[in-house]
Amino acid sequence: MTQVIEALNNGENALLQSPSGTGKTLSLLCACFGWINKRREEYKNSQAMFEYERNQIVLSTKTFSQINQVVEELSKTCYEPIKSILGSKTNLCVNKRVLKDENVSSINEGCKIERLKQTCTYYSEYKKSNI
Ligand code: SF4
C-alpha cells in the first residue's frame, strides 16, 4: 500500500507484484479510495475539490467472475464507490431470444439482427432513454 500511495502522491505509474491470493486487488483499491478520500478532505470547498470528485478507477479483469468477486469483496470495506460494470454480450445480454444461441458469434450476430430489425425491446428502451 505504501508504494501505491507514493505513486499516487507523485502522479506516477507503479508496477507492483504480489503472489496470487494475497489480496492485491482489494489492497490496491482500498489504497486508491483512501487516497482519494484524503485528497477530497484536504481540498474541501476549494476549486481543486472538483479534480478529485471526478477521479475514476478503472479495473479490468480477465474474467467476469473476477469482477463479481472484486465487487463482493469491496462491499465488505467502508468504501461505497459508484460502480459501472462493462462486460460482453454473453455476460450481460438479457434478451432470451438471443441468449438461446450457445456460442459467442451467434449471440453477437443475434444481437446485431435484433438491433437492426428493432426487435430487441431492451435496446429500444435504451435508445429512447437518450443515455
Ligand atoms: S441490444 Fe438486446 S440483444 Fe443486444 S446485447 Fe443488449 S439486450 Fe442483448
Image: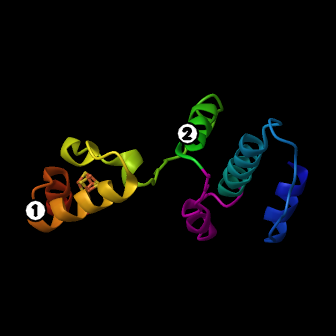
Q: Between 68 and 50, which is closer to the camera in this rendering? A: 68
- Res. 80 in view: no
Marks 2 and 1, Cα distance to the nearest angstrom?
31 Å
Tag count? 2
Q: Quadrant of the C terminus?
A: bottom left
In the depicted structure, whether residue 22 falls above or below residue 63 = above
- Kind of residue at badge 1: Gln
The stretch of residues the image draws in magenta is 42-62
Q: Earlier in the sequence, mark 2 or mark 1?
A: 2
- Label of residue 118 in the image: 1
- Label of residue 77 in the image: none
Secondary-structure class at tag 1: loop
Type of secondary structure dominating the magenta stretch: loop
Residue 20: x percent and y percent? 82, 40
Is 99 on the left or on the right of 129, as rendered? right
Residue at position x 18%, y 63% in the image: 113
Secondary-structure class at tag 2: helix
Within the magenta stretch, is there residue 4?
no
Is 105 on the left or on the right of 124, as rendered? right
Residue 40: x percent and y percent? 65, 56
In the depicted structure, whether residue 96 falls above or below residue 129 = above
Within the magenta stretch, is there residue 49?
yes
Q: Between 105 and 75, which is closer to the camera in this rendering? A: 105
- Kind of residue at badge 2: Ser
Is 72 on the left or on the right of 82, as rendered? right
Which residue carries the number 2 mark?
A: 65
